[in-house]
Amino acid sequence: MDGHDEQSGPGIGDLAKDTSTGRVGVPVDEVGGRFLMRPASGGKEWEVDPDNVGPVTALEEMRARNSTRNRMTRMGL
């Protein structure tokens, strides 16, 4: 089990959407009642209220995976 169910939405380590900004990332921690999210391809974290963390669409997931793949290619990995 990954520590959450379908009703509670994405959890730590899942690809998720910050519904307040439209940004897609991965919740990496929960501090002070807020999630810390990081872009899927890496980068600076931002804080999100748990009520504003939701699932991604198939298109958003594809874009996030593509972005990660492109970044790895640019880095020579």
Image: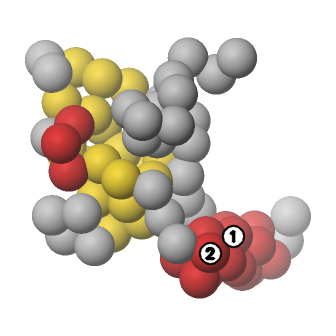
Question: Which circle marks residue 19 in the picture?
Answer: none
Picture quadrant of residue 63: bottom right
Task: Count how many numbered circles sit on residues in the image.
Answer: 2
Residue 23, position as x, y percentages in the image: 33, 69
Residue 42, position as x, y percentages in the image: 53, 56
Residue 57, position as x, y percentages in the image: 52, 72
Amino acid tagged 2: Ala
Q: Residue lying furthest right in this view?
A: 77
The residue tagged with tag 1: helix, strand or loop? Answer: helix
The residue tagged with tag 2: helix, strand or loop? Answer: helix
Q: Name the side, left or right, on which 45 lies relative to 4.
A: left
Quadrant for the N terminus, please: top right
**Which residue carries the number 1 mark?**
65
Mark 1 surroundings: few (<14), some (14-19) or many (≥20) residues within 10 A: some
Picture quadrant of residue 55: bottom left
Residue 66, position as x, y percentages in the image: 70, 79
Q: Is residue 45 above or below residue 36?
A: below
Q: How is the image coloured?
A: secondary structure
Mark 1 or mark 2, which has the lower sequence index?
2
Quadrant for the C terminus, please: bottom right
- Front: mark 1 or 2: 2
User: Looking at the image, which residue is at 30% across and 48% down?
Assistant: 53
Amino acid tagged 1: Arg
Mark 2 surroundings: few (<14), some (14-19) or many (≥20) residues within 10 A: few
**Which residue carries the number 2 mark?**
58
Q: Pick whichever, 49 or 31, lies toward us.
A: 49
| Cα–Cα gap, marks 1 and 2 | 11 Å
User: Looking at the image, which residue is at 30% across and 23% down?
Assistant: 30
| Whether residue 28 is visible | no
